[in-house]
Amino acid sequence: MDQKVALEAIDSYVNAHADEVVAFLKEFIAIRSVTYEEGAAVNFFANKMKEFGFDEVRIDAVGNALGRVGSGKATLLYDAHIDTVEPGNPAVWGMNPLEAQVVDGVLRGRGAVDDKGCLTAAAFAGRAIKELELDKDITLWVSGSISEEDVEGSCVKAMMEESTDIKPDYILVAESSDNRIVRGHKGRALIKIDVPGKCAHASAAWRGENALIKSLPIMERIDKFNEFVEDPFLGCGTIEVTKVECDTPSLNTIPGGAVITCDRRISCGESIEELLKEIEPMISDVKGASARIDTEHVTTYTGYQMECVDYFPSWVLEEQHPLIQAGVAAYKGMFEREPVVGRWDFCTNATHLCGRMGIPAIGYGPGDSSLCHSTDDKVPVAELLDAIRFYAALPLFVPKKG
């Protein structure tokens, strides 16, 4: 089947299955799947891939759902995460966020835009590729990964280590992008600053040393810091204080210790060592203060245990890379217009898949990413259907393998 005929077939297929796509996503949203509690949603998604006729479906030891279509030489991996943030207060939503509603062509509910809409599109794209017999030259893996909201990249890292038979040449990270093609995003690190003090009763504070007060000049310096190296595509990094914890046994005791947590966005590949060195001048005149980047111990819903460093690198794929060009060609072929190629301002599983592993990756997904985690979590149905079209078309344009 030539490309033009294949694109027309994909378009017709998506049109014919539009109602089924909406029903699938509504059913998917109804299954609560907050981070570390994704089991029921993973089972649902794996069973749907089986119903869709995927050639192979499995749930790995970590708890990720994996489905394969085709066995050709060019291997693609489409990844989207199953976990969501907490559904939130129905009174604020004005509805039950797990009972998705479609109003004026927009589907609203927890996970619609982040990230069950994208994963729904990936599943239907795999089904379309299978049923339209477009899988002769490619192998497509679809992964419904877990725990991205908390430790992005970590569960796909474990997935790639556990599933040694998956060797992708190209990766598509399916996250909301307003149906733009994405070729990079900043990374992030969580930096914790320990500030020592000495507890004392608040009525005799002179006997102690208030760690919270000692923390104030550090936070002021962090707030004023702007000596970031600028990346021509990703822009400048940022650093923000996001949490302060005090070590105090009661509300009438001055704190004997404090921990300042900072979110540091990474744009130029800064290493852990470079980030900690950057912090030093901000804490050096506070006696005993020190900075660290932790390693977290994470247990997934299956009981799988991982050590996850709170450092997630940035990534960029050059605009002339064959995968970017394939994405542009697929978009133009399907929609007969030029795509927007840009970046994300948030972190995704591409931090590991491309940032650490170096596998060429692009991002693409329906919906407005500014609505992620909000009580207006929603996706336009038209964009959802267009995402299926793009996901199904992309393999037609990636470079063929020997």
Image (cartoon, rainbow, N blue to C red):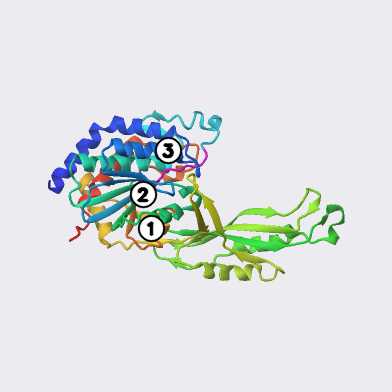
Residue bounds of the magenta highlight: 80-86
Classed neighbour count for the residue bearing mark 3: other residues with Cα under 10 Å, few (<14), some (14–19), many (≥20): many
Marks 2 & 1, CB-CB < 8 Å contact: yes
Question: Which residue is tagged 1?
Answer: 353
Task: Identify residue for label 2.
Answer: 79
Apparent side of residue 230 relative to residue 119 in the rendered image (left or right): right
In the rendered image, residue 178 lying in the magenta stretch gets the answer: no
Under tag 1, what secondary structure?
A: helix
Residue at 43 percent across and 46 percent down: it is 63
Work out whether 312 lies above or below 144.
Answer: below
Q: Amino acid at mark 3?
A: Ala
Q: Are marks 2 and 3 in contact (CB under 8 Å)?
A: no
Circle 2: residue type: Asp
What is the x, y in percent for residue 138?
22, 52
Q: Identify the main secondary structure in magenta.
A: loop
Q: Image quarter for residue 51?
A: top left
Q: Nearer the viewer, mark 2 or mark 3?
A: 3
Q: Quadrant of the C terminus?
A: bottom left
Q: How far is the residue under mark 1 from the one under mark 3?
A: 23 Å
Depth check, front residue: 48 or 282: 48
Q: Earlier in the sequence, mark 2 or mark 1?
A: 2
Give the x, y percent position of residue 127. 26, 40
- Measure how far apart labels 2 and 3 are at the Cα level: 15 Å
Which amino acid, by three-letter code, is at mark 1?
Leu
Residue linked to disc 3: 41
| Circle 2 SS class | strand
Who comes first in sequence, dot 1 or dot 3?
Answer: 3
Horizontal relation, residue 132 to residue 308: left or right? left
Is residue 346 visible to the viewer in this orientation of the structure? Answer: no
